[in-house]
Image (cartoon, rainbow, N blue to C red):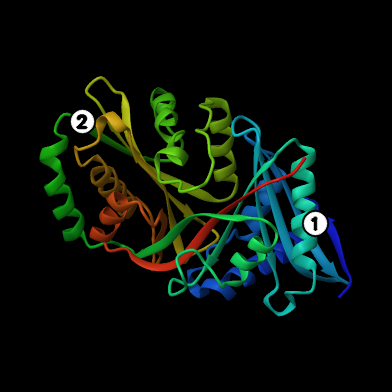
Amino acid sequence: MSVRLVEVTGSDPVQVEAWAAVTELSLRHEVGDAATAWAHQELLAVLRNPSSKRDEHFWAAYDGERLVGTAWLAVPLLDNLDGATIDVHVHPDLRRRGAGTLLLQQAESVARAAGRTLIDAEVQFAHDDPADGAGTPGREFLSAHGYAFGIANVQRSAPLPMPGEVLDALAAEAAPHHAAYRLESWAGPVPDELVEGWLAVASVLGTEAPTGDMEREPETVDVAAHRDDEALVAAQGRTCWRTAALTADGEVVAYTEIVVPDHDPRFVYQWGTLVRTDHRGHRLGVAVKVANHRALQEGADLGSRRVVTWNAEGNAPMIAINELMGFVPSARMAEMQKRLTP
């Protein structure tokens, strides 16, 4: 196989659709129907709306005129300034022929040129596989290229709508513990009066949640950059449903968000949930998640979707909440990391 690499831009929607198709095919080969990948419309929006938070690059590997592999590189611009994230996929029928290595080397080269030395990568695999992914194709590929295992994650999902009696019971159990707080739910951007407090909590999700051996810094709080991200989410055809827990004086101390994509009728995505450390012990994690699901189910046409979330395998408190809400394991992921040589 003679492989050539092409950088993908937003100028060729047909190429973008092929890129998305190969990426999804690769994920489905590893985790079946649990695969969640960008729809090509969502990818096109990313390519046409550059972010102020990260510099992103996309490459396609071709054998002749056939697109056989994909790579994505994200370089943070506001924080974690020694880091970058890489994702590589190859058509399942065309692996072990050099395309993945060329894509990975290209992405690492661009990251190195940007002054980045700490590279994150993720690989997904079946839930029945070992927690660290040992022996699975993606894990072995990254290990062969110098990436070390950092932490194990589990994907869980639950059918929607969640039974009202389940949500009611969870809300009733939690209510006496958070009487001093109020909950606010909405769809769309974070209100101006809450956005700085929201970001102050959300910015530490990556370091407050278990990180294993992954090196990571908190995100920078930047309202303008957050508004750019919200605009991108809207351009992708995604709607965010959000709930915050507030103190009596209106300070945000917990949050959760769910994303409903227009272009994939199978899923909604549970994104971050976090309670500020000095306000834990009041069942606020349960409270915000239940309130958000109630708002979602009252306000969105969900059809027969499933809600999907990821948790570090050792994140017992959040896993316990998710299991009470009916989530069951569906796939695994290993986060891995590599220190580049200058």
* Residue 12, numbered circle: 1
Residue 198 x, y percent position in the rendering: 40, 31
Looking at the picture, tell me which residue is in the foreground, 108 or 189: 108
Looking at the picture, tell me which residue is in the foreground, 217 or 42: 217
Q: Quarter holding the N terminus?
A: bottom right
Residue drawn at x 48%, y 69% as measured from the top left: 34
Q: What residue type is labelled 1?
A: Asp
* Residue 181, numbered circle: 2
Front tag of 1 and 2? 2
Horizontal side, residue 268 vs residue 252: left or right: right
Q: Is mark 1 on a helix, strand or loop?
A: loop
Residue 73 x, y percent position in the rendering: 69, 49
Horizontal side, residue 12 vs residue 284: left or right: right
Q: What residue type is labelled 2?
A: Tyr
Q: Quarter holding the C terminus?
A: top right
* Label 2, residues with CA under 10 Å away: few <14, some 14-19, many ≥20: some
What whole-number distance in Å separates the C-alpha atoms at marks 1 and 2? 50 Å
**Direction top: furthest residue:** 249
Q: In this view, does 254 lie above or below 327?
A: above
Residue 218 x, y percent position in the rendering: 50, 33
* Label 1, residues with CA under 10 Å away: few <14, some 14-19, many ≥20: few
